């Protein structure tokens, strides 16, 4: 029977390495799922921009690893592709910008920082461009570029940006902030110094529609007594909006952020873990705590999505079953 089950799942692009995993999966009572690309299509499209649109897109498209092919095809991460595609709509081509401002350095994205930085040669100077989570990036900014003018960032500016970020997130948009800084030299600057005293330029809000059949699958799991939990690095407002739409977050369940999770002792988390259905702004270490807390309730826990790959520590945790979905 297990062999037959494996064969049927293989026809649907779910490859099982161990026969016993099918039995474990069948007894799972908690499914912890990543959001992007698992519950959603991972086909990003920018639908809203706050700030200087053209300049924000120019900086944003340069601060990506996406490539534009010889036939105009955009190849890379879906989130970055959305920025590059939107820039192309405005006649802003990343390749042409790189010809003028060569990329000479970078600080890669890290889940802990939730930021990415690229460094470009600009005449006799260097242009630092940083994009990432709004709350993280704003902490690095002390100036703002508005209507082409640069001035000190005031508290009212920060409130307006946070309000706009929350407004976009409430519409289930993933929001990224963009900032920059021109400096004379970078050779003696540390990575931390490079990402300081930046000039905020704008926000980009992109939509990622739910995958077909996910809502129905979650409803089926619920009828079978299986609790579906969303674990994501996105803003909590974005996560809650999508979770409500999919039926994950109900009136009887709660959402929590990684920062709030840090304040809860593990024994208290284990006691209250069943109250939560959404975990936002989490790190790989948080995922281990969450899964282990669910396991302490005596439940069999499944972890699905590319979040498994983001957390090497999960491989060391005693998880009931961990499986990745074929995104095709």
Image (cartoon, rainbow, N blue to C red):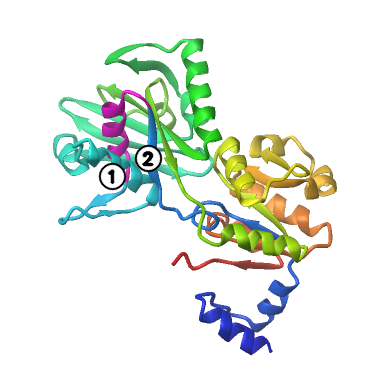
Q: Estimate the spatial distance between the alpha carbons at disc 1 and disc 2, rounded to whole Å.
A: 9 Å
Residue 201: x and y in percent read 35, 23
Residue 317: x and y in percent read 69, 61
Q: Is residue 242 above or below residue 9?
A: above
Residue drawn at x 48%, y 35% is 133
Res. 117 image quadrant = top left
Please rate how many residues cluster around mark 1, counting C-alpha atoms within 10 Å: few if below 14, some from 14 to 19, many from 20.
many
- Which residue is identified by label 1? 85
- 117 or 104, which is in the foreground? 117
Q: Is residue 162 above or below residue 59?
A: above
Residue drawn at x 44%, y 30% is 192
- Which residue is identified by label 2? 46
Mark 2 falls on what kind of element? strand
Q: Is residue 298 visible?
A: yes
Quarter holding the C terminus is bottom left
Residue 86: x and y in percent read 29, 40
- Image position of 22 (left or right of 103): right
Q: Is residue 226 visible?
A: no
- 229 or 182, which is in the foreground? 229
Identify the main secondary structure in magenta.
helix
Q: Which mark is residue 39?
A: none
Asked whether the residues under the numbered discs 1 and 2 touch, taking CB atoms below 8 Å apart as contact, a structural biologist would say yes
Say whether residue 287 is magenta.
no
Mark 1 falls on what kind of element? helix
Q: Which residues are magenta?
A: 50-64
Say whether residue 61 is magenta.
yes
Q: Which of disc 2 and disc 1 is earlier in sequence? A: 2
- Image position of 182 (left or right of 33): left
- Image position of 312 (left or right of 152): right
Residue 62: x and y in percent read 27, 38
Please rate how many residues cluster around mark 2, counting C-alpha atoms within 10 Å: few if below 14, some from 14 to 19, many from 20.
many
Quarter holding the N terminus is bottom right
């Amino acid at each position: 029977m297990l062999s037959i089950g494996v064969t049927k799942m293989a026809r649907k692009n779910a490859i099982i390495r161990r026969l016993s995993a099918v039995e474990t999966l069948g007894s799972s009572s908690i499914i912890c799922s990543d959001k992007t690309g698992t519950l959603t299509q991972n086909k990003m499209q920018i639908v809203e921009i706050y700030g200087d649109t053209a300049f924000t897109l120019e900086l944003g498209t340069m601060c990506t690893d996406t490539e534009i092919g010889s036939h105009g095809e955009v190849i890379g991460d879906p989130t970055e592709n959305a920025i590059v595609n939107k820039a192309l709509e405005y006649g802003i081509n990343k390749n042409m910008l790189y010809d003028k401002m060569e990329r000479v350095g970078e600080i890669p994205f890290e889940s802990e920082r939730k930021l990415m930085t690229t460094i470009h040669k600009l005449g006799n100077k260097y242009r630092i461009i940083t994009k990432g989570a709004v709350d993280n990036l704003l902490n690095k900014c002390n100036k703002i570029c508005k209507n082409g003018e640069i001035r000190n960032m005031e508290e009212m500016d920060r409130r307006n940006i946070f309000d706009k970020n929350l407004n976009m997130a409430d519409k289930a948009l993933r929001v990224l902030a963009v900032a920059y800084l021109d400096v004379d030299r970078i050779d003696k600057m540390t990575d931390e110094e490079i990402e300081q005293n930046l000039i905020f330029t704008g926000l980009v809000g992109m939509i990622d529609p739910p995958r077909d059949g996910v809502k129905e699958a979650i409803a089926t799991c619920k009828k079978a007594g299986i609790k579906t939990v969303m674990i994501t690095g996105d803003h909590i407002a974005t996560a809650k909006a999508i979770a409500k739409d999919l039926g994950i977050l109900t009136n009887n369940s709660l959402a929590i952020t990684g920062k709030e999770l840090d304040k809860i002792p593990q024994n208290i988390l284990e006691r209250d873990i069943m109250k939560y259905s959404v975990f936002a702004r989490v790190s790989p270490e948080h995922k281990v705590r969450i899964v282990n807390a669910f396991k302490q309730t005596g439940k069999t826990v499944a972890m699905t999505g590319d979040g498994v790959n983001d957390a090497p520590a999960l491989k060391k945790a005693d998880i009931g079953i961990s499986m990745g979905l074929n995104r095709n």
